[in-house]
């Protein structure tokens, strides 16, 4: 389930706080499919090339860290509608396996890569064993979905099982320290002309319901699984994925000219939006 960047709300406050037929999809045993209900909305949000944050921050970092090579076999774990796949194909990899628990998102991915024999799409729970986790992949990526899976240690184990010894893995996800839905906010200090980040809760894991398209009626929600950064990194390390790079990714956005622009632009450079990790599977 490659998920939307849950666009960070870069809003301000005074002293308030304020994601011939398609390639065949192989159906695995039934798993979590909570994103089916919002698949249409998410597909429109991300589109063919990704959201604003995908295009400017997430995807460039993913490709730089993963460095896919011609002829490699790559796993796109929690692939959603396949926003990473075109870039992988452009790098001349031999094969891409996309895995997602949502049949509707896999259907959207299939429509995009119709007839491309390099792409194989699988409906499967990333947290459960499956034939895709067969130790045959040179590299794997999980883009904007670490915070969407209920059992991260299980997902990490399946990722490791999918890779060859020495295989590479890259994950990019919402920064666990600074981007906690409903628990982290921007604030403005009028006296110091300073924008700051307030974090209300961090150390305790949380399951946070997210309204997927607020203001449009309905009430569809997905669950954001907040975990402290140590818990996230340990899940991958304990699965046999040695972390070689941990990189914090910052927003590309800048404020419009105005009395708060300097403080806001300083804050953008100080508080990262995403966390990216690069790992190697131990032998």
Image (spheres, rainbow, N blue to C red):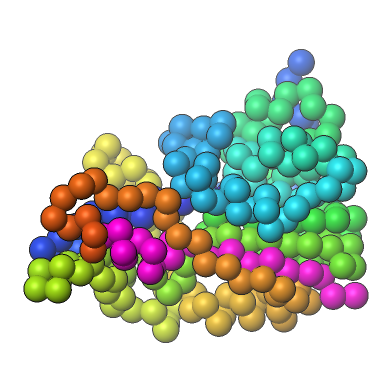
**Residue 3, percent across and down?**
52, 49
- The residue lying at 42 percent from left, 51 percent from top is 252
Q: Which residue is more in the foreground, 140 or 227?
A: 140
Is residue 29 covered in magenta?
no
Q: Which residue is more in the foreground, 166 or 200?
A: 166
Figure check: 267 above or below 33: below
- The residue lying at 15 percent from left, 60 percent from top is 13
- The residue lying at 73 percent from left, 41 percent from top is 88
Q: Which quadrant holds the C terminus?
A: bottom right
- Using the rendered view, name the quadrant where residue 17 is placed: bottom left
Question: From the viewer's perspective, is 195 left or right of 183?
Answer: left
- Using the rendered view, name the quadrant where residue 232 is placed: bottom right
Q: Which residue lies furthest to the top in this view?
A: 20
- Using the rendered view, name the quadrant where residue 186 is placed: bottom left
What span is colored magenta in the figure? 264-283
**Residue 234, percent across and down?**
64, 81
Figure check: 61 above or below 96: below
Is residue 224 visible from the viewing direction of this image?
Answer: no
**Residue 24, percent across and down?**
77, 31
Q: Which residue is more in the foreground, 172 or 82?
A: 172
Question: From the viewer's perspective, is 135 left or right of 125?
Answer: right
**Residue 2, percent across and down?**
58, 49
């Amino acid at each position: 389930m490659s998920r939307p960047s849950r666009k960070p709300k870069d809003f301000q406050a005074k002293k308030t706080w304020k994601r011939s037929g398609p390639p065949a999809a192989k159906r695995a045993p039934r798993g979590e499919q909570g994103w089916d209900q919002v698949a249409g909305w998410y597909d429109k949000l991300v589109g063919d090339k990704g959201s604003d944050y995908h295009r400017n921050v997430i995807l460039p970092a993913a490709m730089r860290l993963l460095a896919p090579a011609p002829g490699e076999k790559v796993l796109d774990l929690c692939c959603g509608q396949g926003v990473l796949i075109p870039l992988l194909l452009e790098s001349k990899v031999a094969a891409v396996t996309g895995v997602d628990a949502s049949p509707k998102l896999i259907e959207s991915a299939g429509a995009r890569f119709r007839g491309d024999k390099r792409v194989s799409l699988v409906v499967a729970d990333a947290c459960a064993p499956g034939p895709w986790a067969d130790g045959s992949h040179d590299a794997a990526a999980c883009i904007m979905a670490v915070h969407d899976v209920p059992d991260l240690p299980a997902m990490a184990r399946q990722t490791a099982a999918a890779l060859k010894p020495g295989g590479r893995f890259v994950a990019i996800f919402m920064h666990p320290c600074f981007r906690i839905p409903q628990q982290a906010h921007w604030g403005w200090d009028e006296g110091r002309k300073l924008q700051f980040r307030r974090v209300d809760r961090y150390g305790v894991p949380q399951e946070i319901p997210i309204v997927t398209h607020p203001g449009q009626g309905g009430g569809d929600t997905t669950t954001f699984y907040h975990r402290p950064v140590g818990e996230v990194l340990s899940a991958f390390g304990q699965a046999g994925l040695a972390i070689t790079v941990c990189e914090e990714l910052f927003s590309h956005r800048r404020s419009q000219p105005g009395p708060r622009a300097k403080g806001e632009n300083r804050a953008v450079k100080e508080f990262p939006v995403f966390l990216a990790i690069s790992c190697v599977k131990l032998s």
